Image (tube, helix red, strand yellow):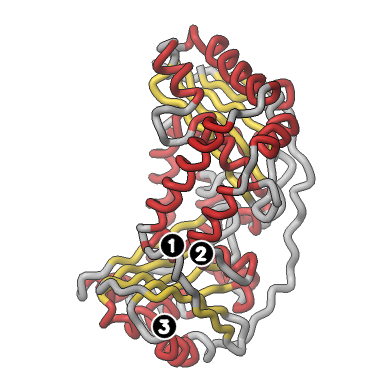
C-alpha cells in the first residue's frame, strides 16, 4: 500500500447506493457491500434479527439455492463471508481480478434478492443457537457483551449481536422480510472495492446490478444513546480465572479527540508487549497473562475499556494498577521521547494493518457510509503524528478517572 499515492474513486448511483474504489496492482481483488444496519436498529421483539438476516442471505435467492451462492465464488478460488456489528452489516469477498463481474452480480443478488426459505430458516436458527451456546461457554468473550449491555442498559446499542435463544426461536420469515424492507435502504449502502480494475467497469456493473434496484430512502431515525449507567458488578462464574472489564462511555466515531483517545488506549494496553499496563501488570508484578485496552466508537457514542484475566485473589491489585496508570497520565504529561515512541508505534501498527487489502476495503466502505469520504493511510498517520503531549494530558484528565469507570467482574 503506497502511503502517498493512494487515491480513491467514488461514485453515487441514482438510487443512492454509493461506490468507493481503491486501485491496486495485485492480481487479487476485494469487494464488499457495507450496509448501515445493525443490532441497534432492531425493535424490542427483533433481538438477533440483523445477525440472523446476514446468515439467511446465503441460504437462497430468487436466482440461486444456498449451494450455488457459495459455489459462485469458491468455484473460482475466491472467498465470501459476512459479519454483523451493532451498527453495520457487511458482505465481502476476495477473488482473482478476472472475476470482478461475477462478484458484483453475486453481492447484488444476496443483498437484494434473498428469499429466506422456511426450511433453511429453521436450520439456521439452530446454527445461531449453537453459536450462542459456544459464546456463553467463553467467559473471556462473553464479558465484553455483558459489560456493554450493563453500560448502555437503557439503549438497544447495549444488546448483544447474537440475540437470546428465546428471541431467535421467535423470529419467522415474515419478520425477516419486514426488517429487511425497513432497514436495507439503498441510500444506506456502499459498495467498496480494492483491485486492479478500471473504475468505469465498476460503474457499468454497478448500474446494471445495483442501480437497477428501486430506490429506498431510510425513513426511520436511530434513537440517540444519550448517556450510560455507572455500575460495579461481580458475577459468580464457575471459572478458574477471574475476568474483568472496567470502562467508560467515550467519544463517538467523528469526535475530534478520537485519535488522541486511540493513542492513549494503545499506550495503556495496545497489542505491543511494551505498553504501560503490560509492563506493570504482567512483566513487573506477574498479575495477568493478558491485559488489553479497547476503544469502540459508534456513530453517537463510544466505549473505552480495559480487560484483563487474573487469579481471583488478584483482582483488586490489578484494578489498583490500572488506577495508578490512569493517575500517571492525568498528572504527568508524556515527555518528548515518550510521545515520539507512542506516535511511531501506533502509526506503524496502522500502516502494517493497511497492507491487508480486505481490511482496508471494509474500512473504506465504513468511512464512505458515515462520512461520504475516506481517509488515506497517510492522512490518518499525519493526524496521529500531530497529537501532542497536551492533547494526551487533556483527554486523560477528561476521561481517566477510576471513580467514573464501571466495572464488571466474573469470579
* Residue 169 drawn at (x, y percent): 51, 52
* Residue 107 drawn at (x, y percent): 41, 76
Cβ atoms at labels 1 and 3 below 8 Å apart: no
Q: Does dot 3 land on a helix, a strand or a loop? A: loop
In front of the other: 168 or 54: 54
Q: How far apart are marks 3 and 2 (CA)?
A: 38 Å
Q: Residues within 10 Å of mark 1 (few under 14, many from 20)?
A: some
Q: Does residue 111 appear to the left or right of 157 in the view shown?
A: left
**Above or below — where is 109 with respect to 406?**
below
For disc 2, the marked residue is 376
Residue in the image at 36% along x and 58% along y: 355
In front of the other: 18 or 46: 18
Q: Residues within 10 Å of mark 3 (few under 14, many from 20)?
A: few
Q: Does dot 2 land on a helix, a strand or a loop? A: loop
Cβ atoms at labels 2 and 1 below 8 Å apart: yes
Residue in the image at 54% along x and 80% along y: 10
Residue lying furthest front in this view? 336
For disc 3, the marked residue is 62
Q: Distance between the residues labelled 2 and 1?
A: 7 Å
Frontmost of labels 1 and 3 is: 1
For disc 1, the marked residue is 3
Q: Residues within 10 Å of mark 2 (few under 14, many from 20)?
A: many
Amino acid at each position: 500500500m503506497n502511503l502517498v499515492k493512494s487515491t480513491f474513486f467514488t461514485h453515487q448511483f441514482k438510487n443512492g447506493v454509493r461506490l468507493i474504489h481503491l486501485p491496486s496492482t495485485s492480481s487479487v481483488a476485494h469487494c464488499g457491500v457495507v450496509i448501515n444496519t445493525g443490532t441497534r436498529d432492531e425493535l424490542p421483539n427483533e433481538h438477533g434479527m440483523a445477525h440472523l438476516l446476514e446468515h439467511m442471505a446465503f441460504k437462497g435467492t430468487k436466482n440461486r439455492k444456498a449451494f450455488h451462492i457459495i459455489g459462485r465464488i469458491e468455484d473460482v478460488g475466491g472467498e465470501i463471508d459476512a459479519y454483523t456489528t451493532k451498527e453495520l452489516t457487511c458482505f465481502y469477498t476476495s477473488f482473482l481480478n478476472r472475476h470482478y463481474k461475477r462478484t458484483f452480480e453475486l453481492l447484488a443478488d444476496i443483498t437484494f434478492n434473498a428469499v429466506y426459505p422456511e426450511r433453511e430458516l429453521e436450520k439456521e436458527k439452530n446454527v445461531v443457537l449453537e453459536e450462542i451456546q459456544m459464546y456463553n461457554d467463553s467467559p473471556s468473550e462473553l464479558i465484553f457483551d455483558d459489560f456493554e449491555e450493563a453500560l448502555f442498559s437503557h439503549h438497544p446499542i447495549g444488546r448483544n449481536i447474537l440475540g437470546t435463544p428465546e428471541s431467535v426461536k421467535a423470529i419467522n420469515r415474515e419478520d425477516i422480510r419486514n426488517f429487511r424492507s425497513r432497514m436495507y435502504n439503498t441510500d444506506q449502502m456502499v459498495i467498496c472495492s480494492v483491485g486492479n480494475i478500471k473504475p468505469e467497469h465498476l460503474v457499468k456493473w454497478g448500474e446494471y446490478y445495483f442501480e437497477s434496484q428501486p430506490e429506498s430512502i431510510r425513513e426511520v431515525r436511530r434513537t440517540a444513546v444519550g448517556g450510560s449507567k455507572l455500575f460495579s458488578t461481580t458475577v459468580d462464574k464457575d471459572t478458574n480465572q477471574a475476568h474483568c472489564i472496567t470502562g467508560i462511555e467515550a467519544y463517538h466515531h467523528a469526535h475530534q479527540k478520537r485519535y488522541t483517545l486511540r493513542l492513549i488506549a494503545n499506550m495503556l494496553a495496545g497489542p505491543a508487549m511494551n505498553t504501560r499496563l503490560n509492563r506493570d501488570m504482567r512483566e513487573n508484578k506477574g498479575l495477568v497473562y493478558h491485559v488489553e485496552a479497547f476503544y469502540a466508537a459508534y456513530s453517537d457514542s463510544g466505549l473505552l475499556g480495559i480487560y484483563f484475566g487474573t487469579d481471583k485473589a488478584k483482582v483488586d491489585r490489578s484494578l489498583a494498577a490500572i488506577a495508578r496508570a490512569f493517575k500517571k497520565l492525568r498528572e504527568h504529561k508524556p515527555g518528548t521521547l515518550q510521545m515520539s515512541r507512542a506516535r511511531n508505534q501506533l502509526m506503524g501498527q496502522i500502516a502494517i494493518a493497511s497492507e491487508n487489502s480486505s481490511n482496508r476495503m471494509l474500512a473504506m466502505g465504513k468511512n464512505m457510509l458515515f462520512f461520504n469520504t475516506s481517509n488515506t493511510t497517510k492522512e490518518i498517520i499525519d493526524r496521529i503524528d500531530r497529537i501532542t503531549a497536551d492533547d494526551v494530558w487533556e483527554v486523560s484528565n477528561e476521561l481517566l478517572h477510576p471513580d467514573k469507570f464501571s466495572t464488571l467482574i466474573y469470579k
